[in-house]
Image (cartoon, coloured by chain):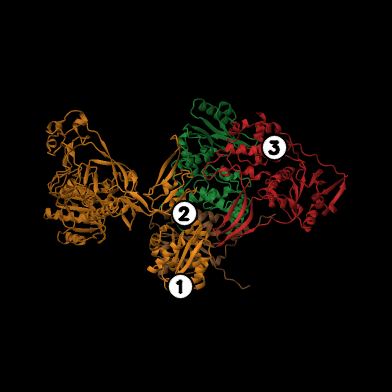
Chain colours: A green, B brown, C red, D orange
Amino acid sequence: MITQERYRTTVKELLANGSIKMAIGYRLGSTPDRRRPLFIRTSEEADQLVLDSTCMTNLSGYLVTEGLLSDEKKVGIFLRPEGIRSINILAAEYQLNADQIVIFGFDSTGRDVRPLDGRNVGEFSKLLNEIKEHPLQIVKEPLHWRIEKMNAKERFDFWQEEFSRCIKCYACRQACPMCYCRRCIVDSNQPQWINTSSHTLGNFEWNIVRAFHLSGRCVQCGNCDRACPVNIPLRLINQRMANEVLDGFDHFAGLSPTQEPVLASFKKDDTETFIL
Amino acid sequence: MSELKFEPKIVAFVCTYCTYAGADLAGTSRLKYAPNVRIVRLPCTGRISPMFILKALQKGADGVLVSGCHPGDCHFTHGNYHARRRWMVFRALLDFTGISPERVMFSWISAAEGSKFADLINSVTEDIRKLGPFDQYQQLIKETESPATL
Amino acid sequence: MTRILFSDKLDNCVAKWRSAGLTVIGPVQEEAISRYAAVEKGTDLSFGTVLPDRSLKELFFPQTEPMTSYTIKKNEIETTDFTPPQGKRIIFGTRACDASGLAIDDPLFGWDYKDEFWFQRRNESVIVTIACTKSDDFCMCTSLKLAPDSTKGADVLLRPIVKNKGWIVEELTERGREAFAIISEYLLESPEPAIPTVIVPEKFNLDTCVAWLQNPENFDSKFWKEISMRCIGCASCTYLCPTCHCFDIQDEGDTYSGIRRKNWDSCSFALFTMHTSGHNPRSTQSARWRQRIMHKFNYFPGKFSVNSCSGCGRCSRQCPVDMGITETLQEISKL
Amino acid sequence: MAKIGVFICHCGENIAAKVDCTKLAAAMGEHPGVAVSVEYKYFCSDPGQESVKKAIRDNNLTGIVIAACSPRMHEATFRKACAEAGLNPYLCEIANIREQCSWVHTDSDMATEKAMDITRSMVEKVKRNNILQPIEVPVTRRALVIGGGIAGLQAALDIANAGQEVVLVEREPSLGGHMAQLSETFPTLDCSQCIMTPRMVETAQHPKIRLLTYAEVESVDGYIGNFKVRIRMKSRYVDMSRCTGCGDCITKCPAKKISSEFDCGLGKRTAIYTPFAQSVPNMPVIDTASCIYFKNGKCKMCQKSCQLNAINFEMQDEFIDLEIGAIVVATGFQIQNTAVYGEYGYGKFPDVITGLQFERLASASGPTAGKILRPSDGKEPQNVVFIQCAGSRDPSKGVRYCSKICCMYTAKHAMLYAHKVHGGKTHIFYMDIRAAGKGYDEFTRRAIEEDEASYIRGRVSKVWQENGKLMVRGVDTLLGKPVTVVADMVVLATAMVPQSDAKEFAKNIGIAYDEYGFYNEAHLKLRPVESSTAGVFLAGACQSPKDIPDSISQASATASKVLALFSKEKLEREPVIAINNEATCAGCWGCVLACPYNAIEKKDIRDRSGRLIKQVAFVNPGLCQGCGTCVSFCRSNSLDLAGFTEKQIFAEVMGL
């Protein structure tokens, strides 16, 4: 509550003195356990700001809304560490100017919410490096263990079962801050690389290509996983790919606004034990 | 019905400067290898997108081979270094989703390695033959051709 | 006296229907989601949820449907049509909103071209609605002038009796009567009273909303931008909606053979109205959200005299950013 | 509607013996879009080609597939035939059914089946081929040579002598580079100045060469044939149009105790100076850091002494913008700072010097007029120790590579010393003697056999001073024991390293460099004098350590590359290049990073009022080499590669 109140005051001040033209945060949702995105432009709207441990959505995707940043005015945004990493990637991929973003960082343990020090993305580099070096112990869920024990055939069947539910609503893509393409590859039809139909093959192709495009870019904010209306455990794939680029290339997505995209760069001594 | 021997279908994506030339050398040296491979020629391994692999599988490939110049030999100086990273990531992704690395393989074959090319095609064909047809993927394809259920 | 189907006889009924050649479909709780699916036993059915996660629509209008397979030959193109699936089926335990959705879409699929896939399935299906005794924060059938025990689209209406012991059977149509004749041996005359239907509070005044929507001045209201600002443009609302019916025809396959398919499409997508030229008449997400609301409550009723919404609330329930029809119409009511 | 011709070649018996060509032709004839499907014994023969041309004309074919040998054999042949028949040559594809089918398979049925797949997939590809035209890039026939050392001079002269314009930029006040500092050169022991000076003069006087000394390249934009180069002319404070090089100002300059860079600190110069007596141009510059006027605001002795009013203290840096067609980078090297080897005592003991300093001592025009005198007391050293690999081949403190020239120049130094100091004794610590080159091994043998240089195989661990002598402690690995040599002077064969600003400069002009800062060639073996950027060539030691003959050969090679480029008004290039769909490009610039050729630029998209809407990638057709690395990176599928488009490959795979 203290954090929330303090941030309300800060946002009001920054709006009042013209430092920011808008702040993107959270407000109460349609049920007590829901929070919804809030666009704060006035002091009254700032009073609606809610900041608690249930504020999970990574809001950074809203920053690349067409036209939002084109007037070069600053925009504030409430972000967890994953969200801050998203800002770094968006900056590294030239989708926004990091200096235009005023970060209201926060994190939570249990129900406690605490603010993170810093406003500009650069000020969080120490924090992000610490997270890289000491990743939060991800509590392995039963699914993890199940998949680990599977052989290739069983894994294939497992994922096909999961993907068979997909309805291609693209909520995963739309919720993802990294999916900022003007035209998604699935919507590119000359040629149609990915079967648009929502049969299992088309669903598999879609999900695997999205996971590939997110490799080295996903910060595991969980937006896609939460958005999926049919509960496909997308987090597991993205986590797996994040581990792959971390182990393989020491790449921790979103560490700095100048980080080189891992799949557009290389090292001459990259591992190649798998190549015949 | 007589027992039909399973003949694996293998699609190879190769760069024109090294592996394609290596395959030509296998030919000019009259080396013999299994006829199961179909070669798609690209300018560089850097041009080989993961989509190609998925489409080869959709066309019923039981195995896919991707091959290019050895590190340092790339005609385009470092297309193959980029490719190597993509392969490693894509391969891990396929593996995690149940497409065994034994079905999607990567190699470096230079223009001088005609015999390596022939040997590799033989061993890959035999490996895939042992693995059997990629029934699971072909089942997915079959599903797309059947009417909606219920 | 009323006729009652006791739950402990459901297994027998399912077996009976199945042996009579009907596919039995009903709400099923899977590991990840709940939906309507075919079952072999009555015990596979699950009536505990307010509403299955996925709507009934997809059993009549699947997300992807092959229509024609084609092969391009040297001098002609050979085609083979897929025929709509044959076979009677009984859908046991739909919710009133889902069943209403079918009735809402019937005129759409039949007003000029009769969609044989839709009607084949419609004609072969018996819809057994169970009146709701529970609701959640998102239910809004009453706001749409429907009810938790609406008979719209249903062939049979069941009203639960106390302790979940069974249902009072009200046969509504000939098709319903025929289906229940098969299991008549399990229907008992009994005076058990029905549990009262849940009271779903009215969330907005539909007439006010419609009037506002019909006023051409409001087409360009800045309300649309405000209300849809957080919309991310996914299709989860449209794809889970029991009445949204847009589709796209796609040819899929290799370079000389393939299948022409009917796939779900959504007005939420920017691509939905994108012209080849690159021009997009609905270039913003607010224009797309406005279209969805206008379509459901203004254009569709204008053509078919019925709102294209049955109040299931799935759009709001599943929305990744907590939007939905409810909120929008509530806000319109306040204008 | 596609009208494809399929031409199946028997190649005598080479294909027909294994592949059932008749069956193949019949099957292809039934394939949709195929208008003609014929077989013939040798399509590459004249009558074969004629029949292809006739079929193209008679049937108005929209594309052809030649099912025959590898495209590496006859693609060019058949594309030419296409063009002659009026069909765009890029509408021809080759189905390789010889090298990759008939020659390598034994089972005839399976080979035929494979040949069908191969041919069919090429038919599907060619249906989607686009008409492509060779890319024409206009060429500005003016070369820029950066660096006035021996490599730069050679390149400039070769290009200019062929009649093309050259702009030569040298950042020092005079041409010459390192070669001008050398005394004699191996393996002939001819005087460096004697062979260098005429080259410098010839360059300066050449009508086709515009010489810009005391100038630096500020920026390079554009691409092959069309570079826009900005040169900064550093202010000399001497008006070159007035100065005659009389040298009066230099004599009058009161600041005389400035350490001479040219003499590696062994000699002195004035604040207004020419680096050496034979400087070209022979016009001084004022070193503002040492000039009394610039420091204190008083003096102007030079100005007073100058009869021609050539001294101008108000002079400012000037910029020259040039249009350039090709660039030769010959920026040379520097020697490694030997201070990293504290144990050798460089900097601490004045008589521990570098090889380059020894060159100055041995040079007739040097500070000692060619006498070998030690820096500390000006006495002639009687014992000299040379330490080879003082930096090279030393991963721990120095550099991993071999500097290539040190074995030779150390042998030369030993010989020069022996010739100048009779009775003097030389010891050379070495790791290996690398004397590969014409007359090189003979040369080192002479040093040992005739001039009695004593070679000790081993490294030196420490140099210290004792009783006015330098004590050199090393190990003789052949004897397997430590040795200590008493010396009057120690000469270090320091490593050749890139210029300290090499990386920065490379970024500035857009070429790639290695971990050390040496410039990367486009291909180590096949394209050793081209940089990774088209139109930029590399000469001399900026690419890797080189001796004079190697530098000159490479310089001449770059000249021939430049002249080949200048041989036509327009540069014709294969149209297999990447193209971008600007409507869908998200401007993430992953392609810019992935491109090995810096061929992708950022392009502004503006609305009618000029407001910037977005930035998208633009592939420069002059630079793109067509590898396609960017295409498969592009997440939105905005980039594509002509000749190997997504549509073509999709069709090819789907046709299998």
Q: Quadrant of the N terminus of chain C?
A: top right
Upstream in sequence: badge 1 or badge 2: 1
Chain under disc 1:
D
Rounded to the nearest angstrom, the CA distance separating label 3 from label 1 is 76 Å
A194 with respect to B113 (left or right): right
Is there CB contact under 8 Å for labels 2 and 3?
Answer: no
Same chain? Circles 2 and 3 = no
Q: Quadrant of the C terminus of chain C?
A: top right
Residue A144: horizontal and vertical position, in percent?
Answer: 59, 51
The numbered dot on residue D462 is none
* Mark in front: 3 vs 1: 1
The local crowd at label 3, few if under 14, some if 14 to 19, many if 20 or more residues have their Cα within 10 Å, is: few
- Please name the amino acid that badge 3 sits on: Asp
Judge depth for marks 2 and 3 and give the one in front. 2
Under circle 3, the secondary element is loop
What residue sits right under mark 2 in the picture? D645
Above or below, comparing residue A172 to residue B79 in the picture: above
Query: Is circle 3 on the same chain as circle 1?
Result: no
Horizontal arrangement in the rendering, residue D275 relative to residue A35 (left or right)? left
Residue C178, above or below D248: below
Q: Is residue B17 above or below residue A176?
A: below
Subunit that carries the residue with mark 3 = C
Most extreme residue toward the front, as rendered? D58
Q: Please name the residue that numbered disc 1 is placed on.
A: D16
- Rendering coords of residue B106 (x, y %): 47, 59
Residue indicated by mark 3: C137
* Residue furthest to the top: A16
- Residue D10 in the image: state x and y as whole percent: 44, 71
**Residue B32 vs residue D569: left or right?**
right
